[in-house]
Amino acid sequence: MDKTTAMKSAILELEKQYWQAMESRDFETVQRLTHFPCMVAGKDGVMQVDEESFKKMFDSGEGKQMKVLGISNAQDQMIGDNTGLLVYVIQLEYTKDGTTTASQCACTSTWIQENGEWRCAVHTESEMKAK
């Protein structure tokens, strides 16, 4: 496996680790995998988020259980040796107060390597229409 292929594979695995940590409410892993300040775009708009604000956002999800049902259609591209782009579709299920809802989002993540560690610097989510 060449260096570029290995890096692309690593970025997809890191993205999966990120979602697993979100699902299990493991803030330490999410924090380790995030470049601060990070940039986020989604249904609540666009924002640049520092570490303290990110922790508040993370904690606000307490009481709401998220389950990752699957990641599909992943495509990636390396931009030089220290930047990787990843796009994919994720299927999620949320449960709060006994009510379960499902969603499907098209996501993008930009991963950068600093001091030998990969971290997500930009993440976007666009909710997809039900088919």
Image (tube, rainbow, N blue to C red):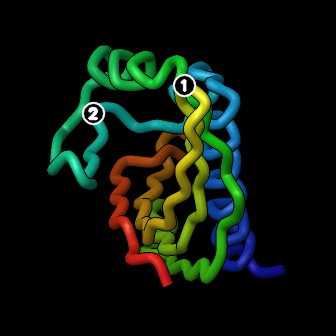
For discs 1 and 2, the disc positioned in front in the rendered view: 1
Residue that carries the numbered disc 2 in the rendered image: 37
Q: Residue at x 16, y 49 (%)?
A: 46
Asked whether 27 or 125 is in front, the reply is 125
Residue at coordinates 27% horizontally, 54% vertically from top-left?
42
| Figure label count | 2
Can residue 129 be seen from the camera position used here? Answer: yes
Please give the residue where the numbered disc 1 appears in the rendered image: 97
Circle 1: element type? loop
Q: Amino acid at mark 2?
A: Pro
Q: How would you rate the neighbour count of disc 1 (Cα within 10 Å): few for under 14, some for 14-19, many for 20 or more?
A: few
Left or right of 123 on screen, residue 17: right
Identity of the residue drawn at 59% across and 36% down: 95
Distance from the alpha carbon under mark 1 to that under mark 2: 32 Å
Which amino acid type corresponds to the residue marked 1 in the rendered image?
Asp
Determine which of the numbered discs, if any, sits on residue 78 in the image: none
Residue 116 visible in the displayed image: no
User: What residue is rendered at 74% in x and 70% in y?
Assistant: 6
Q: Would you identify the image quadrant in which residue 9 lies?
A: bottom right
